[in-house]
Image: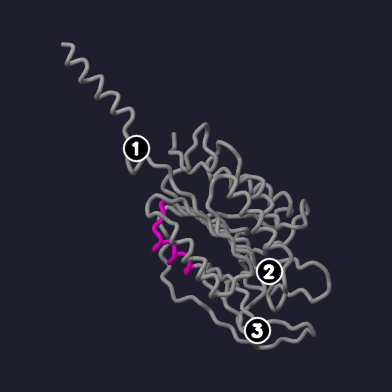
Amino acid sequence: MLKFFIFFYVLFIFACTAQPSLEERPMKRVALVVGNQDYKDNVLDNPIHDAKGIAKTLTSIGFDVHLTLNSTEAQFNQALQNVKSKIEPNNTLLFIYFAGHGNTLKEDSNEQFLMMTDKNETVLISIYKLYDFLNKAKARHNVMMIDACRDYKEHYVPVGKGKKNYRGNFRGVSVRSSDGFKKEEAVRVVDNYAHEFPKSTLISYATDPAQKAKDWSEHDMRHSPYSYALIQHLADEEVPIGEVFRRVRESVLNETNRTQGNSEITKLEKNIWLVPKRAEVAFAPPL
C-alpha cells in the first residue's frame, strides 16, 4: 500500500512540475510600426511622432517592435522581412501600424493604397500586399492599424500655409504643384496581390470609407486624433481588443465632431487582451 501511495505521489509531483506543452507557451508579441511624413509633395507633420508614440506604447506591454521611419518601398519590404523572421507561426500576436499618406484610386473602392517616401517616383502600395504578407507569415493573430485617408479626393494644402490637415495626397496619377497647376509625374502602383483576407485578423482604419484622416489632434498637436487615442488606450488593462478600439472610436468621434471615426474589419477567432487580468502572458483566452 505504501509503494502504491508513493508511486501516485511521485506521478502527481511530476505532473505539476512538467514543462508546458507548445499550446501553453506564452504567445510571442511582434510589431512593425511605420511613420512616413517626408514626402516630396505635401509633407506631413506628425506620422513620425505617431509612430514613435505607438512603438513606445507597444514596447511597454511586451511587444518586440521594429520601427521604420520615412520608408521607401525597398525599406518597407526589408522591414516586412525583418519582422517575418521574428514570427513563430501559429504562436505570435502581430501588430502592424502605418501612419502617412493614403487614398483609394477609384471612386467607391475599398482598396486602400499607402504611399512610400521614394523621391524619384510616387510609390503606392496596396493594402492587399499586407494581406499577402500576413497570409504567408502565419502568425496566430494579426492586428493592423492604418492612420491615413480612405477617400478618393486630393487633399492639397499649399506649401507654407500652415499645418497640413489631412493624410491623403493623390488621385490617379496627377498632383498639384506649389504654383497651383497640376503636373504629371511618375507613379508606380504595387497592387498585384490576391484579396484573400488573412485568418484571425483585425484591421482598424483611422476613418470610415470615403473619409479624411486628420494629421493633428486638438489634444496634442504632435499626434493625429487616431494615434493620440491609440496611445491613450492600447495599454488599458483587462479589456479585450474590441473594447480598446471602441474607446478609441469614442475619442476620435468626440474630437472631430463626428467627421472622422475609426472603423474595424475583423475575423479574429478569439478575444485578445493586450493587458490581461492578473496574468503575465501575452494572450489570454476568453472566459
Callout 1 amino acid: Pro
Tell me the magenta residue range: 128-140
Estimate the x, y position of residue 129 in percent, counting from the top left: 47, 69
Kindly report the distance in space between the C-alpha atoms of the residues bearing marks 3 and 1. 58 Å
Estimate the x, y position of residue 224 in percent, counting from the top left: 70, 58
Q: Residues within 10 Å of mark 1 (few under 14, many from 20)?
A: few
Name the image quarter holding residue 236. top right
Image point (68%, 82%), residue name: 175
Give left or right: position of 112 versus 251.
left
Q: Which residue is mark 1?
A: 20
Numbered circles on residues, count: 3
Residue lying farthest to the right in this orientation: 161
Q: Which residue is mark 3?
A: 174
Q: Which sits earlier in the primary sequence, circle 1 or circle 2?
A: 1
Q: Which sits earlier in the primary sequence, circle 3 or circle 1?
A: 1
Callout 2 amino acid: Gln
Query: Under tag 1, what secondary structure?
Result: loop
Callout 3 amino acid: Ser
Instruction: Tell whether label 1 touches label 3 (CB within 8 Å).
Output: no
Q: Which residue is mark 2?
A: 37
